[in-house]
């Protein structure tokens, strides 16, 4: 009933733990049965190990969570050696989220991931919290086309490209990435935002700006997914403020093939299970036999 096929990969259900809030699943494995998830997108990886940004990295506001982690990660080699075997033991689809500072870093990272049993690569051209690369590739269509096409030329895995809501035109950006070879699109990443410490008279974050996520961005993310799903002929994965089965169903009705849950994992660690169960309950109550019956009905 809940299964989803994306690029030939069978997901048990449309729930994917989003990159950035789920690590590699180790901490969550102590809290619930991770094999129930449709998939996991890894912590954002870079070619080489990164320590992340200095200063405060997470800050809760009245409108959502701001983060400025800066892609702290063990590097692609560290991921392959220490984290991937664990993730593959979880009996769910494993997606490697890959970021970078230069095109050359992305390409070298892809070359290493090609030789692994990662199921899919999510190309992160939308991280707002690194000073070079990151979101810089996801703002202008020409830059996005350049990196996606070069990665597509060598990538042996299904390629999902994660879009930034800060793109100049989200629909044009989506179409550009598909023309460059993206097999799947995921959207949206966090919104560029900021907070100020009024006692110190300074920005909360050393980088001044950070990425905003959480329920406050959901209506905007939903609109973007709706517009993009109607403009491209590849699967779209909806991301942005999903904390309930109703939220997830809204994204699916807007055209999403699957959804990712990010900040919700901080609110309730097993929230993905609640959402999966809620979707199933809704479908049984409404006599819906498959998600295809309601996907994109708006």
Image: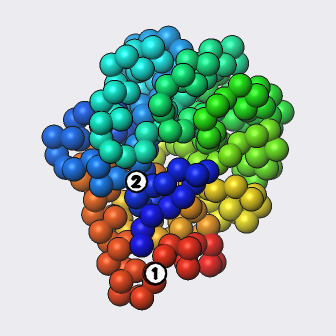
How many residues crowd mark 2 within 10 Å: few (<14), some (14–19), many (20+)?
many
Q: Which quadrant holds residue 154?
A: top right
Residue 100 position in % (x across, y down): 59, 21
Q: Which residue is mark 1?
A: 289
Which label's residue is closer to the chain start, 1 or 2? 2
220 left or right, relative to 170: left
Nearest the camera: 230 or 113? Answer: 113
155 left or right, relative to 23: right
Label 1 residue SS: loop
Quadrant the C terminus occupies = bottom right
Number of numbered labels in the structure image: 2
How many residues crowd mark 1 within 10 Å: few (<14), some (14–19), many (20+)?
few
Quadrant the N terminus occupies = bottom left
Residue 238 position in % (x across, y down): 54, 56
CA–CA distance between discs 1 and 2?
18 Å
Q: Please say if 268 is above or below 226.
A: above
118 left or right, relative to 226: left
Q: Are marks 1 and 2 in contact (CB under 8 Å)?
A: no
Residue 45 position in % (x across, y down): 48, 24
Q: Residue at x 61, y 19 (%)?
A: 111
Q: Residue at x 23, y 41 (%)?
A: 28
**Can residue 178 be seen from the camera position used here?**
yes
**Can residue 102 be seen from the camera position used here?**
no
Q: Please say if 240 is above or below 65.
A: below
Residue 193 position in % (x across, y down): 53, 39
Q: Please say if 201 is above or below 49.
A: below
Label 2 residue SS: loop
Q: Which residue is mark 2?
A: 38
Q: Residue at x 53, y 65 (%)?
A: 251
Q: Please say if 33 is above or below 296.
A: above
């Amino acid at each position: 009933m809940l299964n989803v096929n994306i690029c030939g990969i069978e997901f048990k259900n449309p729930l994917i733990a989003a990159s950035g809030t789920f690590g590699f699943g180790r901490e969550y494995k102590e809290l619930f049965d991770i094999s129930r998830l449709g998939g996991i997108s890894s912590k954002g990886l870079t070619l080489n190990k990164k320590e992340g940004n200095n200063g405060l990295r997470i800050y809760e506001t009245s409108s959502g969570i701001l983060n400025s982690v800066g892609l702290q990660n063990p590097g692609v080699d560290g991921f392959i050696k220490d984290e991937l075997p664990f993730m593959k033991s979880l009996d769910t689809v494993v997606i490697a989220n890959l970021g970078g500072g230069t095109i050359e870093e992305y390409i070298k990272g892809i070359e290493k991931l090609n030789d692994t049993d990662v199921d899919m690569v999510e190309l992160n051209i939308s991280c707002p919290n690194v000073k070079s690369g990151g979101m810089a590739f996801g703002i202008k269509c020409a830059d996005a086309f350049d990196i996606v096409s070069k990665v597509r030329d060598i990538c042996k895995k299904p390629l999902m490209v994660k879009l930034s809501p800060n793109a100049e035109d989200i629909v044009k950006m989506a179409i550009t990435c598909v023309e460059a070879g993206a097999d799947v699109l995921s959207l949206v990443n966090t919104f560029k935002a900021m907070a100020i410490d009024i006692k110190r008279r300074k920005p909360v974050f050393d980088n001044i700006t950070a990425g905003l996520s959480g329920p406050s961005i959901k209506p905007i993310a939903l609109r973007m997914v709706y517009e993009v799903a109607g403009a491209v002929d590849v699967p779209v994965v909806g991301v942005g403020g999903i904390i309930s089965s109703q939220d997830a169903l809204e994204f699916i009705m807007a055209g999403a093939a699957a959804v990712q849950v990010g900040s919700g994992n901080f609110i309730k660690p097993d929230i993905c299970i609640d959402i999966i169960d809620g979707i199933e309950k809704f479908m049984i109550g409404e006599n819906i036999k498959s998600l295809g019956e309601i996907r994109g009905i708006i």
